[in-house]
Amino acid sequence: MLHLTEIGHFALSLALALAIIQSIMLFRGARSGDQASIKLGWLSAHLTFILVAASFVILTIAFVQSDFSVALVAAHSHSLKPLLYKISGVWGNHEGSLLLWVLILTLFGALMASRLKRLTDGQSTMSYALSVQGMIVIAFIGLILFTSNPFERLTSLPDDGNGLNPILQDPGLAFHPPMLYLGYVGLSVGFAFAVAALIEGRADANWAKLARRWVLIAWSALTAGIALGSWWAYYELGWGGWWFWDPVENASLMPWLVATALIHSLNVVEKRNLFHSWTVLMAILAFGLSLIGTFIVRSGLLTSVHAFTNDPARGLVILVIILIAIGVPLLLFGWRAGTLARDQDISSPALLSRETALQANNLLLVVTSATVLVGTLYPLIIEAVNGARISVGAPFFEASVGPLLGLMLIVMPVAPLLAWRQARGKTITPYVIPMVFVTVAAGAIIFMLINDISIYAMATLGLGIWVMTGVLADIVAIMGGRNKIFHSGFKRLMGASLPRLGMNVAHLGVAVFTIGIAGVSFFDSETITRMQIGDSQISGNNTFTLAKVEPIAGPNYTATAATVIMTDESDNQTILTSEIRRFPVARSQTTEAAIKSGFLGDVYVVYGGGTAADGFVIRIYQKPLITWIWGGAGLMMLGGLLAMGSGGSRVSGGSRGSKQHSDPQRNNEPANRPMEG
Amino acid sequence: MKIRLAFFVPVIIFLLFVVVSFWGLYAITTGQRSTSDIGFSMQGQTIPDIALASLDQHGQINANAPLDLADWQGKAYAINVWASWCPPCRAEAPAIHQLSKSLPVLGINQRDKPQDAMAFLDQFGNPYQQIGVDPDGKASIAIGVQALPETLIIAPDGRVILHHRGPVFANELHGSIRDALNTLGIDQ
């Protein structure tokens, strides 16, 4: 076999050496401006990526060929597995997922390096950032080589592998970890820029512009990754839940919240040259929380339903990495944060201004993230203090996180309408009054249509609508306000800046997501019943008839499939087949729900086993608007990607030249605003 | 350059996190604490003596007639830990009913409001011989519960012969639970 595995191991070791060169040379180059050092660092960053990619491909080949002489393959794969899951098996375990993590890390390093050459301004910032990026690569390759080597061989060859946990054998989960890692690791770029800013003592508009796109792509990937995981849990676990407040989920939510704050505060640095130290802190924390999340998942510190490994020794190594990777930058922050603000506008923004609104947004997001962190670690803290053991469940998180996010949703739609520095009531009232009117009217209609609607359901729905009116208002503002909307509105919309359109798409996503949560949390229903073949059951507006229960065979499992025919009010029939799959190799089973998805929600049917004598258990769930949760997340991701486009108006001259703007954002436009695009 | 103390607040909080985490891991390696202290498997262990105030059929919490596991010694029984706010607990309700036909099932109602728990029992039926209330989750942790729902099957000598995590569906009834009942000599 050409000893491919050993070559992979060697390539990874070589990558470690090159990452060290990358880190040292770029630091040196950034300090002295020595182009030869920068060039060498540039080359090393590319080569590190190529070597890590080679070792990743080699590990994948070992999985695809079922080379059971490799310990990792023997432990996590099986010759009967379908090809897709042989490949996803590479990252379905601790060692391989770390390698994927490093692969993405070095990919970002290579992308940063190729940007470095094209930069004229900010080359030293980018070099420092890439040097820091190299240090992270060193830590993680070191972690792999010294504690979690995926290329370890077995001395005796097993007949076949252990198989992959069948619950992970699913397309949703094959792509969930890579997406999530793209997000976590992408945040390392923002982190590297933050450390560079602290070293240079400068975090100005130019710095924010350099960092912005990296943070946006990481945030979009993180959004998609979390949504994929939630979607997977929804259809795979078989009882229709989509968020469980498990430590592992919280570990992904915390950096997402802080990264959301970071995107907004970067905007203030870029446009108003304010919030420097805060923004740098957010960039450090966003990645720091990603690392802490990884640590929580892999150390065995907390119990979670989907912890990878419970290895405290390995956990201590990760803790030391975190201590250095986050502790040193935070110490640096304490020492240098005071130097970051330069040429700052000394007149502080008015109470009614976009700065204040974004400050509120940032504070609420950070407090929410801190609440999730405290809730997640609380059992550990209490145990350290007095030895008592407690658990924190979903009720705590719902009661604390819900109101915090609700407060944020109140501010959210107004913020984009406010001008920088000082917003004038006169320019925002023409927008805010119709927004309030539409929200109240929509609320009244809902109140009349739905009997016995609870106050919480009403509030959640109302917030979703409120946020939606904010998006509409900003679109109207982009189109020139009420006076010009029919005159030149379309042209203005086409010429609007991508970041502003992206913001509106993402905010629309939040609105859709909120309405989805309202639907599924307050209006869901479930029917759990025992049926004989031919029995019917009414649930919601549909009739469900159990047609048959029969055994079927899959590629590496056997299953029992129950077929239920759903008949709606107008006699349309839908066939829903739910399965219980048994995986003989892994000696476990999974439930495959049958889901009829629609714009207004899902019907979710699960076969719960049973016998002809006792009847078959069929569970029918109505999940109104649940599709809006994934749709909302998709819009947020799309908005993040759109916002990566260049800022400023894409039509030169255009609306900028006209004398009287009805766009409230444009009032008091700072004179020193950098011209982009 | 001005150094402000406030800028050091993040690093101080972070160091506190590291200290707590280090303690958490170090205590595991020295054996003082084990991750299994929360959410350990009771399988093969002896069930500890637990006495809980009970929830009577009127939804009243009654400390005078507690659910005391010592009373059940010498009998085979099952413990099902549940709550009204737990969706998979609803999903497993038919299977728990089925199980209650084979042996007595004791319910531990965790972190719940009595009126919510009663509404749950009204909707899905009450398969429990006795219900103990565990308002702060301490009793659940003492028997290794990680996340709701969990079900344990206990032999007359107090040994846990099955600790099942997650909902019980009819398939468990025909698999691991049937095996456990067979060990006890109980026919389903």
Image (tube, grey):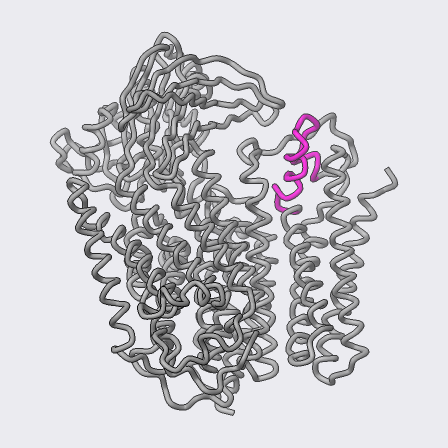
Residue A387 sits inside the magenta stretch = no
User: Is residue B127 depicted above or below A255 in this figure?
Assistant: above
Image coords of residue B52 (percent x, y): 23, 37
Q: State the residue at coordinates (34%, 16%).
A: A545
Image coords of residue A61 (percent x, y): 76, 40
The one of B52 and B46 positioned closer to us in this rendering: B52
The C terminus of chain B appears in which quarter of the rendering? top left
Residue farthest right in this picture: A2
User: Is residue A86 depicted above or below A363 in this figure?
Assistant: above
Q: State the residue at coordinates (54%, 54%).
A: A221
Q: State the residue at coordinates (19%, 48%).
A: A445
Q: Quadrant of residue A609?
A: top left
Looking at the rendered structure, the number of numbered marks drawn on it comes to 0
Tell me which segment is drawn in magenta.
A72-95
Image coords of residue A425 (percent x, y): 25, 77
Q: State the residue at coordinates (22%, 25%).
A: B126
